[in-house]
Image (cartoon, grey):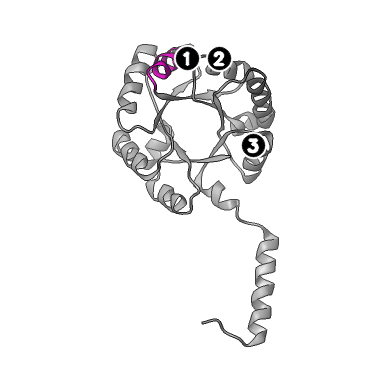
Amino acid sequence: MKFFVDTADTDAIRDLAALGMVDGVTTNPSLIAKAGRDILEVTREICSIVEGPVSAEVVALDPEGMIAQGRKLAGLAPNIAVKVPLTWAGLTACRVLSGEGHMVNVTLCFSAAQAILAAKAGATFVSPFIGRLDDINLDGMALIQDIREIYDNYDFKTQILAASVRSVNHVTEAARIGADVVTAPPKVIRDMVAHPLTDKGLAQFMADWKATGQSLD
């Protein structure tokens, strides 16, 4: 499974990249606003930190505007994946941009039917939102499973990018089901290392080592 980090915080991206934990990055207008930086500037910087895909989202709502903005974003770096919403306008832009050889991430997917359309439109990635479905008492993981089965049935090349990840369990379940990519906030990726038995075992090892009176320094 590929790990994308869902942030526009370049310091956090650098820290995770240094450990080999970043295969790509996803951003959106909300994350850009949180970073408080110019979208073109921060996107260029992110693209210089990671070699993998960096999703940068258009903000136009009409297909012509999306296509123009997508081309502008794609011109920033060769690893840009233009992010468009799963609307008819977004699918139109996806078809054009993917036809021009650009990576396209179709986002805000909430149904298997939408995911089929994204694949037919030539999307590089489709981003089903797990957490937001869970928020309204629907099963986000069931959607990942449905899309995986459908894509495998027809050998669709679009990669399933599990998004709106809120917890470590989301990451492990997405991996179990077979999502190609998970994008998660830096905190969730870091939380994956935590386990109380690891902490307990390490504390016991340290106590026992201290009792030996030895040193490795």
Was residue 98 drawn as part of the magenta stretch in this picture? yes
- Using a 10 Å C-alpha cutoff, classify the residue at mark 2 as few (fewer than 14 neighbours), some (14 to 19) or many (20 or more): some
The answer to whether marks 1 and 3 mark residues whose Cβ atoms lie closer than 8 Å is: no
Measuring from the top left, give residue 68's x and y in whole percent.
32, 18
Measuring from the top left, give residue 158's x and y in whole percent.
54, 24
Q: Of label 1 and label 3, which has the lower sequence position?
A: 1
Was residue 66 drawn as part of the magenta stretch in this picture? no
Measuring from the top left, give residue 148's x and y in whole percent.
65, 26
Label 2: element kind: helix
Label 1: element kind: helix
Give me the residue at 42% from left, 37% from top: 31
Q: Amino acid at mark 2?
A: Leu
- Say the numbered circle drawn on residue 174: 3
Give me the residue at 68% from left, 38% from top: 176
Q: Nearer the viewer, residue 164 or 192?
A: 192
Give the spatial CA distance, label 1 vs label 2.
8 Å
Q: Of label 2 and label 3, which has the lower sequence position?
A: 2
Magenta extent: 90-101
> Eyeballing the image, is 43 above or below 146?
below
Give the spatial CA distance, label 2 vs label 3.
21 Å
Give the spatial CA distance, label 1 vs label 3.
25 Å
Q: Quadrant of the N terminus?
A: top right
Q: Of label 1 and label 2, which has the lower sequence position?
A: 1
Left-right relation of 118 to 30: right
Q: Nearer the viewer, residue 136 or 28?
A: 28
- Residue at the disc numbered 2: 117
Give me the residue at 39% from left, 18% from top: 97
